[in-house]
Image (cartoon, rainbow, N blue to C red):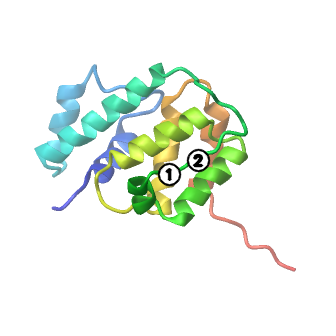
Amino acid sequence: MKENVFDILMYLFEHYFQDTVDIDPDRGQIEADLLEAGFTRTEIQKALTWIDELAQSRELPAGSDHPTAMRIFTPAEAARLDTDCRGFLLFLEQGGILTPTNREVVIDRLMALDDGDIDLEVLKWVVLMVLFSRPGQEEACAWMENLLFDSPQRLTH
């Protein structure tokens, strides 16, 4: 079974995280459950480290969430995040869904996936995970959930 860190993260978010991103109380049991589900120990450790670092990001100060700030992507980021992904991040920021601080956490967590190129679907899930982990982001989180789970309606003319 060739699973990657993102697959484990999806499994964790579907099965364990209802109210908050916190794996400390049942970490041993979660690891055992993941092994039983067929994930490799190496990938499990990478995913748990990814979650730990996401949880630590809650401690970040808001920083300079200035609305006119511009983000320049590094060559490594641009190589992994295609123009659709970068455009979607800009769309979310301009729409008030992502603050500049949350955008940086999203980019950091995307780059930490270490699984090659990142598509729009992975980006949307990581945005949802980041928003879910940050206090006070309930409205933005609900908006992303709607974007992910509601199928778009076709308009008739």
Point 62% across, 54% down: residue: 147
Outermost residue to the bottom: 157
Quick one: SS at disc 1? Answer: loop
> Is 80 in front, or is 156?
80
Q: Circle 1: is it few (<14), some (14-19), or many (20+) Cα within 10 Å?
A: few
Q: Is residue 75 above or below residue 47?
A: below
Q: Considering the image in quadrants, where does the N terminus appear? A: bottom left
* Mark 1 or 2, closer to the camera: 1
Determine which residue is flagged by label 1: 73
Q: Considering the image in quadrants, where does the C terminus appear? A: bottom right
Residue 36 visible to an observer of this rendering = no
Q: Residue 49 placed where, x, y %? A: 26, 34
Point 72% across, 67% down: residue: 153
Q: Is residue 143 above or below residue 22?
A: below
Quadrant in which residue 29 is drawn: top left
Left or right: residue 157 compared with residue 28? right
The mark that comes first in sequence, 1 or 2, is 1
Instruction: State yes or no: discs 1 and 2 in contact (Cβ < 8 Å).
Output: no
Residue 57: give its label: none
Q: Amino acid at mark 2?
A: Glu
Q: Circle 2: is it few (<14), some (14-19), or many (20+) Cα within 10 Å?
A: some
Q: Residue 91 placed where, x, y %? A: 67, 53
Determine which residue is flagged by label 2: 145
> Is 117 in front, or is 41?
117
Residue 53 visible to an observer of this rendering = yes
Q: Residue 95 placed where, x, y %? A: 72, 46
Q: Amino acid at mark 1?
A: Phe
Left or right: residue 35 compared with residue 92? left
Point 61% across, 31% down: residue: 137
Point 40% across, 60% down: residue: 80
